[in-house]
Image (cartoon, rainbow, N blue to C red):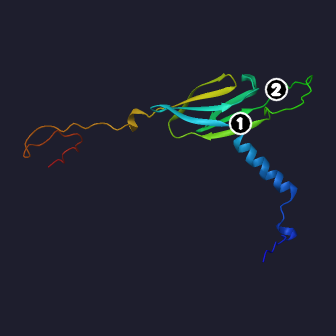
Amino acid sequence: MNVKRKPAKAERPTSKMRALFREAARDSSYPPYNIAKVGQDKYRITMAVAGFTADDLDLTVHENMLTVKGQLKEQDKDVEYLHRGIGQRAFEHRFQLADHVKVVSAGLDNGLLNVELERVVPETMKPRKIEIGAGSAGERGKVIEARPAAAA
């Protein structure tokens, strides 16, 4: 028996809800981007931003959050498009940067925005090798930290 149940009116998604989900899905994927490891502690974010100029893009870093915004400043008003397949709508992407990751540079080449990142760990946080001194078990080693002897 094949029974098709028609959802109750309250269960049906409204056109506004469908549009909201469609817009949310579109925003997370536009413009498309890659994140690549290009060396030890070096990374690159590449975004496809065809049609945008350097003046149309804004990159900011604040508290380990890289924000990339795109907004066309000048639109072709004299052009009548018969088909418009190159997306040029405004966008904003946020990238949470890991600790000690810094933006080194950004460049726009052939419609691709490349943001170069580098992980710079402070010397105090890097592992360091501790040398073990030679000597017999009965000898006292070198004192690194000592408290002053109590006066008798």
Q: Which image quadrant is residue 97 in?
A: top right
Judge whether 127 appears above or below 74 on screen: below
Q: What residue is rendered at 11% in x and 43% in y?
A: 140
70 sits to left or right of 78: left
11 sits to left or right of 138: right
Name the one closer to the observer, 41 or 32.
32
Q: Residue 72 has which mark?
A: none
Reading the image, the residue beneath label 2 is 73
SS for callout 2: loop
**Residues at marks 1 and 2 touching, judged by CB atoms closer than 8 Å:** no
Q: Position of residue 62 (x, y in %)?
A: 62, 36
Disc 1: CA contacts within 10 A as few (<14), some (14-19) or many (>=20) = some
Name the one closer to the observer, 66 or 79.
79
Separation (CA) of disc 1 from disc 2: 17 Å
**What type is the residue that disc 1 sits on?**
Pro
Q: Which image quadrant is residue 13 in?
A: bottom right
SS for callout 1: loop
Reading the image, the residue beneath label 1 is 31
Q: Foreground mark, 1 or 2?
A: 1
112 sits to left or right of 83: left
Q: N-terminal of the two: label 1 or label 2?
A: 1
**What type is the residue that disc 2 sits on?**
Lys
Q: Position of residue 21 (x, y in %)?
A: 78, 52
Q: Position of residue 9 (x, y in %)?
A: 87, 69
Q: Position of residue 46 (x, y in %)?
A: 62, 31
